[in-house]
Image: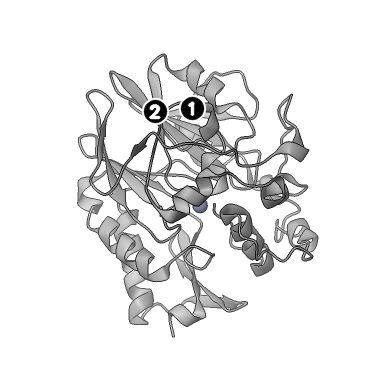
Amino acid sequence: MRARQFIPALLLALLAAGCGGKAEAPADAAPEAGVENRGGDTANWWDSLPRAEWSLYEKIVQDQDWFEVYRIADGVYAIYEPGQFEEVISFLIEGSEKALLFDTGLGIGDMRRVVEQLTTLDVVVLNSHTHYDHIGGNHQFEFIYGRDTAYTRGRMRGSSTGDVAEFISDGWIWKELPDGFVATEYRSQPFLISEIVDEGSVIDVGGRRLEVLVTPGHAPDSICLIDRANRLLFTGDTFYLAPLYTHIPGSSFDDYVASAARLAGLAGDIDSAMTSHNVPVVDGSYMTALGKAFADIVAGSATDYVVTDGNREYQFDGFSVIVREEDVK
Ligand SMILES: [Zn+2]
């Protein structure tokens, strides 16, 4: 999950509750006012769509209006869901023998159908982390790689409809929901993990080796995936061009500091970073900026921040980092 800078703290709390299925969500704190105003100075968040960056890539024909699919690199497709506020992006990465689906989106459209229209290869799934907007289609796939963490095991059980109802309510979605989608039944479906992956695990899809980097911070089970031969890094929600979360339930600022430093150390090994929200590809040099940002926050030399409800949002070039005040005092 991710949010734009104008999203209010109350809504952030609810977002986190939805992602983590946390019971401490203030059930009576309906965030309608926040949702109505999520456009900040504009009427609606979607008024800024389409994002110009997508026009750089070849759009691939498939038959669901809910998705947009683009070829963003050789054998790599970005499966984008611009109709919902998260603007989540899943990635299909093809080898010569099979294809790896890095995240399965919101579970609103039919992810399996779109994937089957892109490749005839067997498809295996790996999640960047198990927030609701990255696991929605997991239940449609037979083979899922996953982390062996307590958090992951909790997310495997699925969510209730109440946990995620907010995310398909007015203000969150501008596109028509797909035929057959039943809003009252929307939930994260349970799924099973077929094979455990951990730090250094390599998934060889045939002529393409995808290596797992354990990068907790945004979520306890966050990973990145690196394709060293092709100099590509798939960051999940550890990096994207929007506010990075260190402050939501399940996040860890200290873990994120270490993960950011680690990714900065990989900047020389990659040309591009594939990010899971808003825009699919950013320059690899952002990993250097990410590491410096967290190091500067820790050192106290990052001074450009605003405080909202006990959180500091530090501004950097192209992204920001939201930190609980107690983590930096
Ligand atoms: Zn997330």
- Residue 8 to residue 118: above or below: below
Residues at marks 2 and 1 touching, judged by CB atoms closer than 8 Å? yes
Residue 123, can we see it?
yes
- Front residue of 91/241: it is 91
**Percent position of residue 306, x then y:** 55, 76
- Residue 16 to residue 223: above or below: below
In this rendering, position of residue 207 left or right of residue 104 = left
**Image mark for residue 320:** none
For the point 31% across and 67% down, the residue is: 292
* Mark 2 or mark 1: whose residue is earlier in sequence: 2
For the point 64% across and 68% down, the residue is: 9
- Residue 90 to residue 5: above or below: above
Residue type marked 1: Phe
Mark 2 vs mark 1, CA separation in Å: 7 Å
For the point 73% across and 40% down, the residue is: 174
Q: Secondary structure at mark 2?
A: strand
In this rendering, position of residue 224 left or right of residue 47 = left
- Front residue of 79/183: it is 183
For the point 75% across and 60% down, the residue is: 37
Q: Quadrant of residue 46?
A: top right
**Percent position of residue 255, x then y:** 36, 66
- Residue 322 to residue 284: above or below: below
Residue on which disc 1 sits: 141
Residue on which disc 2 sits: 124
